[in-house]
Image (cartoon, coloured by chain):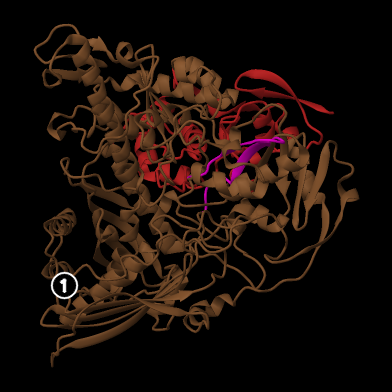
Chain colours: A brown, B red
Amino acid sequence: MNKIVRTSGFSRRALLKGGALTVGFALSGLPRGAFAQGAAGTRMLDPKEVDAFLAVNGDGTVTLFCGKVDLGQGLRIAMPQIAAEELGIDIAKINYIEGDTALTPNQGRTSGSNGIQRGGVQIRQAAATARKALVELAAQRLQANADDLVAVDGQVRRKSGGPGIDFASLVVGRQFDVKLDPKAPLKDPAAYTLVGKSLPRPDVPAKCTGTATYIQDFSVPGMLHARVIRPPAIGAELQSVDESSVKDFSGVKVVRIKNFLAVVGEDEWTTMRAARALKAQWSEWSGLPEQATLAQSMHADPSLTAQTLISKGTAAKSENAKALTARYFWPMQSHASLGPSCAVADVRADSATVWTASQGTHGNQTTYARFLKLPKDKVRLIYVEGSGCYGMNGHEDAAAEAAILSQAVGRPVRVQWTRAEEHGWDPKGPPQLIEVSGAVADGRIVDWRTDMWIPQTTRGLLNIPLLGPEAAGLDNIVGLNTGLISQNGDPPYAADRIEVVAHWLKTAPLRPAPLRSPGKPANCFAVESFTDELATAAGLDPVAFRLNGLKDPRAVEVLKRTAALMKWQARPSPGSNTAAAVAKGRGIAYIHYKHSETYVGMGMEVAVERATGRIKVERVACAHDCGQMINPDGVRAQIEGSILQTLSRVLMEEVKFDRSRVTSLDWASYPIMRFSDVPKIDIDLIERQTEPPLGAGEAACAAVGAALANAVFDAAGVRLRTLPFTPERVKAELGGKAS
Amino acid sequence: MPSYRLRINGSERSVESPDADKPLLYVLRDAGLTGAKFGCGLGQCGACTVLIDGTAMQSCQMTVADAQGKAIVTIEGLGTPAKPHPIQAAFIQEQVPQCGYCTSGMIMSAAALLSKNAKPSEDDVRTALDLNLCRCGSHVRVVRAVMAASGQRG
C-alpha cells in the first residue's frame, strides 16, 4: 500500500506546487500522444467516454480522472479500489486526479452521499468497458478468443497461463475511443481482491505530518493576500470609504466595487491589520425576523404555498384510536468548518484559473463565466482540499471573491476568511418547522399527517447566490438552494393513511445552503420522535412497535441488529425511574435514507441530570446497511463522523441573530462538541457485497436527533421537540415549563 | 523591518515582522511551516497548537516578540511521512483524520500530554485535548491513537 501513497501523493502535490499540470504529467508519467500539448482543454472530458476517466501510461501505470472530490470522506482510496479492481491492475499503479475542470469529467457535485453510489458506479463501468476493450485488443494480437483471456496485474493473458501483454503495449499512445458500455461485464463480487478491503487512505500520512497542502496553505507566484470587509448589517449598502485610514500600511490597496469592499496586499499580516483599520460607512439595515418568534413567523408567513408531497390510503375508523399532535423545530445551523474558507484565483484578460475547495468545480464554470464575463471554456477550476465543509460552507464565496479581486487588480489573489466571517456569513442549514398528527389503534398506525414549513429550493439553480458578485453588482444567481430537505417526512411504517404536506416559504431568514444530510435530520427527528410518542400511547415497546410496521427484510434486520447491539430490554417508554436525580434511559430510531438508499438503526443510552438539565450521551449503537462497502473502515469513519457531528448539532447548535446580523461569531457563542462530550460508539456494519453501494456520508446523521430525544424521554419522561437540547431548555422542560 | 530570532524545530531562524505583535502562527506559516493551521485566531479551537518549551500552546495567541528565546516545536518538527513520530504513526495507523484540518493541533496537544504523562488514562487524553475542536467527528479515533502511541491498547 505504501506505493499508492507515494504515487498519488507525488503527482497531486506536484500539481499543487507547480500550479501547472505539465509538472504533474511529467511525474505521473502520462503518455505523450493526446497529452503532448499539455494544455487545458485537450483532454477528452465527455463522461460518456472511457477516455474521460482512464488513461493507460507508458510506464504501466493508469491515471484515473475523477470528477468527484475527496473532502476527507475517503474517495481518494475508494475510487482507485473500484477502478483497479475492475481493470485488473495493482492499485499501486493507479495515479489519481480529482475535481479539475480541465482534466476530469463532470460527474456532478460531490453531495447527497452520492460519491460512490453514482460517481463510483460510473467509474466502475468505465473501468469494465476499458477492460473489455483491452481484452479484445489482446485477442486480436494473440489471435485468441476473448473469452479465453483474462485481465490481471495490468496484463491480458490466457486463462490457461503463459505470457501476457501489458496494458501499456495494447493502448499506449492512443486513446480507448469507446463509450461507457452499460453492458460491459462486471467482475463477480465473490472474486474481489480490492473492493471490500479497508485499505489505508493515501492522504492520511501527509495530514498527520503537517505536509498536506490545504487550500489555506496554497500559493502561486506573484499572489496578493486579500481580506473582504463585511458590512455590519447583512443588507447594508456601502456609503463611503476613507482610504487614507490605511495609507500607512505598506503595499496595501483598497478595492471597492459598489458594495464589495476589500483590501489586498503583498503581506498577509499587514493586509489583516489594514482590514481592521479601514474606515467605511454603511447604511442601516434591519430586515431579519425576530429570532425568538421565528417558528411562529414561519408558520404564519404570507408567502406560503402548500404542496401535498404524499397522500396514500384512507384512515381507518377505530373506536379505540388514540390521536396525538406534536410540533418540532430544527433551527438554523452553521457548517461551522474548523478552518475559515479560503481560495486563490488568477484571472487574466482572456482566462481564469481558480483553486478552490468547491464540491462542484464543473458546475461553477458557468457561474464564473457569467460574473467574470469570460467564455465558459476559459474558466478553469481546480479542486484543492480545504477544511471539512459538510455541504457548502463559505468556500464558494471565498473563491468567487478571489476571482473578482484578481480581475480587479490583475494579479493572482488569495482570499482568506476570518472566524467571524465563517460563522457569520457561511450559508446556513435552513430552519425547519414540522407538525405531525396521527393516531394509533390496536398497536398500529391508523393515521399520519406531516406538515412541514420550510424554504423552497429554486428549481434548476446553478449554485447558491454568491456574496461577492451580489455585493459587486455582477451577474449573480438568484434564488434559494437548501438541498432536498423535504424527504423522509413520512413514516417508513405501515399506516392506513399517510399524508405529507410541504408549506413552502419563498425566502429564508439567512441565505440557505445544503448542510450534511439536508433536511433529513429534522424530518427523521420529527417522524421517529412521533413514532415513539405513538408507541407510548399504545403502551408498546418502541422496537416492537416499529417492527410491527416494517416488511422490508433489510429494514427489519438493521433494526433488530441495533437492538441486539444495545442489549435492548423490551418495555414501553418511559422507564420506571424518571424522577431520579440522574435519570437513565435508552432510545432508538430508524431511517431508510430517502426511502431508497442506506438503512440505519440508531440507539442511544443517556443520563439526564435533573438538577442541571445536562444530557450525558453515554453510548451510541448503530447498525448500518449501505449495500456494497468499497472500504469498510472508510464507511465506519463516515458513520462515526455522522453521529458525532449530528449529536453536536442536536445538543448545542443554533445560529443566533438580531434584526441586522448573525451574532454567534465564534466557538464560544456557537459551541460544538468537545472530547468530554464524546460517547462510546458501537457500529455494526452489515455486509451486502453483492448489492449496489448506497452511500455512507449522510444517512446516519438523520437518525441521531430522534434516537437522542427518545432516550431522554425514556430516561426522564420529558419530550424534547425543539433543538438544541441545551441544559437550560432541558431544565425548563423538566420543571414543566415549555421551552 | 525589525527582525526576531526564533528557535524553531531545533534551528535558529531570523524572521522579520512589521510589528512585535505579529502572532507566531503567521510567522511560522510565512516561513513555510504550514502544518499549524489558522482556525480562529481567538485561542478557541487549537488548530494552531505548537509546543513552546514543551507545553502545548496556541500559536495564534503568542506574539513573535514573546516567542523569542523559547524552544518552538511544530508538527513538522516531530516527524515526516517517511519517518513519523510515534504519535504520528499511531494517527496514521488508526486512520484518524477525515479532513485533517485539526489533526496537527491534536497531535501537538497529544505530544505535550505524553511527554508529561507516559501512560495516560482515556479520561486524561480527553481532558488534555478538550481545547482542540474537530468538526468531522474524528474524536474516537484520536483517543484510540493517543492510547496506542502510549503503548496502551483500548
| Chain that bears disc 1 | A
Residue A718 seen in render: no
Q: Residues within 10 Å of mark 1 (few under 14, many from 20)?
A: some
Residue at 36% from the left image edge and 40% from the top image edge: B141
| Quarter occupied by residue A406 | top right
Residue at 35% from the left image edge and 64% from the top image edge: A705
Q: Nearer the viewer, residue A418 or A477?
A: A477
Residue A575 seen in render: yes
Q: Quadrant of the C terminus of chain A?
A: bottom left
Amino acid on which disc 1 is placed: Ala
Left or right position of A162 against B2: left
Q: Is residue A342 magenta?
A: yes
Residue at 50% from the left image edge and 52% from the top image edge: A392
Q: Position of residue A15 (x, y in %)?
A: 53, 25
Left or right position of A109 against A317: right
Q: Position of residue A518 (x, y in %)?
A: 41, 59
Q: Secondary structure at mark 1?
A: loop
Specify the segment rendered in magenta: A336-359
Q: Position of residue B2 (x, y in %)?
A: 83, 28
Left or right position of A458 against B142: right
Q: Position of residue A109 (x, y in %)?
A: 44, 47
Left or right position of A33 against A445: right
Q: Nearer the viewer, residue B143 or A65?
A: A65
Check the image and report above or below for A464 versus A726: above
Q: Is residue A41 magenta?
A: no
Q: Quadrant of the N terminus of chain A?
A: top left
Q: Nearer the viewer, residue A79 or A696?
A: A79
Q: Nearer the viewer, residue B26 or B107?
A: B26
Q: Residue furthest bottom?
A: A319
Q: Badge 1 is on which residue?
A: A494
